[in-house]
Structures are given as structure tokens and as C-alpha cells.
Image (spheres, rainbow, N blue to C red):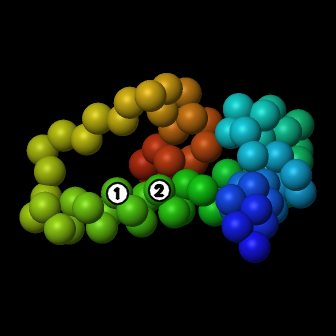
């Protein structure tokens, strides 16, 4: 069960076998529906978690994402959408 939860779920399961965000971005750009779904679910989960932390802190003046997140953010749908 531990192996299933730690290595075969999340992005890996949603994308039919890929857990690397950069690889998923490439597959999504090549019209990979499963990769696009995995990135969309990932983006929603991250936005929800960030929103929860902001609510707990009573708001923020600035949000800084680190560890290479800027390349992931711009292509995975984490950016603020203006629909």
C-alpha cells in the first residue's frame, strides 16, 4: 500500500505513468490529454493549498515561489487566469 501511495498515485496515476512536471508539460504541449489533466489537477491543488495558507495568515502582501517553481508555474496553469 505504501508503494502504491508514494509511487503510483498523484500526477503519475492521472497522467498514465509520468510524474515529472517538465515531462508532463512537454506531453501536454503535444496534445496529451492525460498530461493536461494531471497538470490541471496539480494546479488546482497548489492554488487551494496556497489559498488556505493565505487565509490562515489573514492575507499576504507578497507571495514568492522558489525551487524552480517559476518554470512550472508559467506552463502548468498556476498563473492567475483572466477569463
Q: Which residue is mark 1?
A: 50
| Residue 16: mark | none
43 sits to left or right of 66? right
> Residue placed farthest to the bottom in the image?
1
In the image, is residue 62 above or below residue 80?
A: above
Residue 80 appears at what percent x and percent y? 43, 48
Count of labels in the image: 2
Q: Which residue is mark 2?
A: 46
Visible in this render: residue 62? yes
Q: Nearer the viewer, residue 50 or 83?
A: 50
Image location of residue 3, percent across then percent down: 76, 62
Which class describes the residues within 10 Å of circle 2: few (<14), some (14-19), or many (20+)? few
Q: Are marks 1 and 2 in contact (CB under 8 Å)?
A: yes
Quadrant the N terminus occupies: bottom right
Element class at badge 2: helix
Q: Residue at x 12, y 44 (%)?
A: 61
Q: Position of residue 27 (x, y in %)?
A: 85, 39
Q: Quadrant of residue 65?
A: top left
Give me the residue at 67% from left, 52% from top: 39
Give the distance between the C-alpha atoms of the residues marked 1 and 2, in whole angstroms: 6 Å
Give the residue drawn at x 55%, y 55%.
Answer: 43
Q: Tag 1's secondary structure?
A: helix
Q: Residue at x 61, y 36 (%)?
A: 75
Amino acid at each position: 500500500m505504501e508503494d502504491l501511495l508514494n509511487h503510483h498515485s498523484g500526477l503519475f496515476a492521472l497522467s498514465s505513468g509520468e510524474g515529472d512536471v517538465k515531462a508532463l508539460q512537454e506531453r501536454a504541449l503535444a496534445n496529451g490529454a492525460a498530461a493536461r489533466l494531471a497538470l490541471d489537477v496539480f494546479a488546482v491543488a497548489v492554488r487551494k493549498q496556497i489559498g488556505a495558507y493565505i487565509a490562515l495568515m489573514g492575507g499576504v502582501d507578497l507571495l514568492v515561489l522558489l525551487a524552480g517553481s517559476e518554470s512550472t508555474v508559467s506552463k502548468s496553469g498556476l498563473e492567475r487566469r483572466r477569463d
